[in-house]
Image: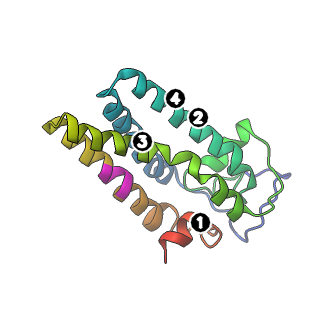
Amino acid sequence: MKDENSNCSIHDSCERVVPPWLVLLDNIPTLILFVLGAILLGKIGWPLAIAMTLYNIASIVLFWKLICPHCPHFNTRACPCGYGALAPIFFSKQDSIDFRQKFRRNIAIVFPAWFIPFGAGLYLLYTRYSRDILITFVAFVIVGFILIPAISRFVGCKGCELKDQCPWMTSSAK
């Protein structure tokens, strides 16, 4: 995937190719999180579920626009989530002033995918408790707050040469 015009500044990183199973392992739980979040919000009202789904899609695209073009993995298959190969389809590489700073400044765009459904789940448990709501909420919490961070830390990001620059890994690894 690397072309002659890309400039990868990480030694041996551009030659690394993350296997498709790892890209799926990184992305399927996020998709499940989005679906569970939409289900929780849908129990309050279907327009909220639609709005959350649209926001989740937009937040991924914004991630590609605001963070990926500054990453040394841009336009390579070295990115564990596959964004390094997808983002160049829509966006151009930017001069990387400081990848860590760009990541830290813009990562909050994905936080609503975790915290809005979490808040909705708490609200539903308080106002309309049911076994189905509890199961959906517990599944959401397990996927979003245990499974996704564990996959990132112990599998997806484990072999990444950028983990020293990445606020996600440096904050969770300490």
Question: Quick one: SS at disc 4?
Answer: helix
Residue for point 77% across, 61% down = 8
Q: Amino acid at mark 1?
A: Pro
- Residue 43 magenta: no
Q: Kindly report which numbered mark, 4 or 3, lies closer to the viewer in this rendering.
A: 3
Which residue occupies the extreme bottom position in the image? 174
- Is 155 left, or right, of 163 in this rendering? left
Q: Secondary structure at mark 3?
A: helix
Q: Which range is magenta? A: 141-145
Pointers 2 and 3 in contact (C-beta within 8 Å) = no
Which colour assignment does the render follow?
A: rainbow
Label 2, on which residue? 58
Circle 1: element type? helix
Q: Earlier in the sequence, mark 4 or mark 1?
A: 4
> Which residue lies under the disc numbered 1?
167
Q: CA distance from mark 4 to mark 3?
A: 13 Å
Q: Position of residue 125 (x, y in %)?
A: 21, 41
User: In the image, what residue type sits under mark 3?
Assistant: Ile
In space, the residues marked 4 and 1 are separated at their CA atoms by 26 Å
**Counting other residues with Cα less than 10 Å from the Cα at mark 1, is it few (<14), some (14-19), or many (20 or more)?**
some
Q: Residue 152 in the image: state x and y as whole percent.
A: 47, 61
Sequence-earlier tag: 2 or 3: 2
Q: Which residue is mark 3?
A: 116
> Mark 4 is on which residue type?
Leu
Q: In this figure, which residue is indicated by the disc labeled 4? A: 54
